[in-house]
Amino acid sequence: MKFELTQEQKMIKDMTQKFASEELAPESVKRDVEKIWPHEQIKKMSELGLMGMMVDSKWGGTNMDTISYVVAMEEIAKVDASAAVIMSVNNSLVCYIFQKYANDRQKKKYLVPLCRGERLGCFSLSEPQSGSDASNMNVYAKKEGDNFIISGTKNWVTNGIQSDVIMLFCVTEKNIGHKGISCFIIDKDTPGVSVGKAEEKLGIRSSDTCELYFDQVSVSKDNLVGELGDGFKIALSTLDGGRIGIAAQALGIAQASLENSIYYSKERKQFGKPISANQSIQFKLADMAMQIEAARLLTYKAAWKKDSNMNFGVSASMAKVFASEVAMQSSNQCVQIHGGYGYIKETGVERLMRDAKITQIYEGTSEIQRVVIARDLLK
């Protein structure tokens, strides 16, 4: 058992760290305050191969392992969690489905431009009446000849406004529960597809989240992913991998909280000495470091199991719930260490705490992760 990154993984870490510092950091506070989507930064991330990291090079990806992806996600999220979630959705959710479940025709048409940054994807599962109960869907696709006619509303769609391709889950056969759910590829410019307003969010404000509306949208059977009724299985499998990406995002936020706290505590002087000389501050830093290291090990283990073709679902749940809680705790302590300066937007520290919260909610709440873990223990 080795606890060291390979040379290639170290290169990925250095490259993404440099990119984040030079390209993401300068206006990260401005983008958050003004809700500016990072168009130029995402374009450059695509040029670096960060938008299709785990996709085979045959389909335009960079053919990297999951640990490399986790390392890159952490470095991006340390500086800008909004850019990290845009990257995560395209990689962990959209490209993953194309790579694992789509046919070659679909991969050639959609996956190649998604990896190259020529198009952007979104993952549309939740509905107004369903969140954790993902099988409780109302969006319906009615079969008419060689097409399906889709109507209904989806919500909480990350990348929903900026995306070009929608990975949509909907009901194709009623009254049989999750077995009647299927997955479709929808071009967002298809007649009948419309986009709701951007949601006003607590955090990750420079990424977009919206509702999507489908009004008698006609989609060819050629855009069905897998077989009819495969949708729920595809969604759950995809979310297992997505949780590793969110754990890495939470790791980045937590690590940024620690690094900011160390720097500030050594610079800030009170009563004639830096506040880092106070044992109360030292204990906060030590606790943050221990928790982050534990979260990192859980996340790397889940990534390693995925790369080793092992069952990684429970490990992904453990990594996500633990890392997201560490992110909340660490960012909260970071604000506390900064005092009044931690509470104002200019320093960027309060953004860490706002961004951390969503990692406990999306792609499966902490409560759902505990259900997954407990079921495995008790089966």
Image: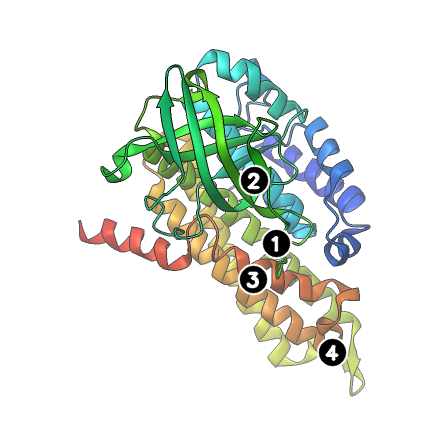
Q: Is residue 366 left or right of residue 72?
A: left
Q: Quadrant of residue 34?
A: bottom right
Q: Nearer the viewer, mark 2 or mark 3?
A: 2
Tell me how far mark 2 sits from mark 3, CA to CA.
25 Å
Q: Earlier in the sequence, mark 3 or mark 1?
A: 1
SS of the residue at dot 3? helix
Q: Which residue is mark 2?
A: 88
Tell me how far mark 4 sits from mark 2, CA to CA.
33 Å
Q: Quadrant of residue 272?
A: bottom right
Residue name at image x 66 percent, y 23 percent = 116
Q: Which residue is mark 1?
A: 199
Q: Which residue is mark 4?
A: 340
Tell me how far mark 2 sits from mark 1, CA to CA.
19 Å
What colouring method underlies this structural image?
rainbow
| Amino acid at circle 4 | Gly
Q: Quadrant of the N terminus?
A: top left
| Amino acid at circle 2 | Ser
| Amino acid at circle 3 | Ala
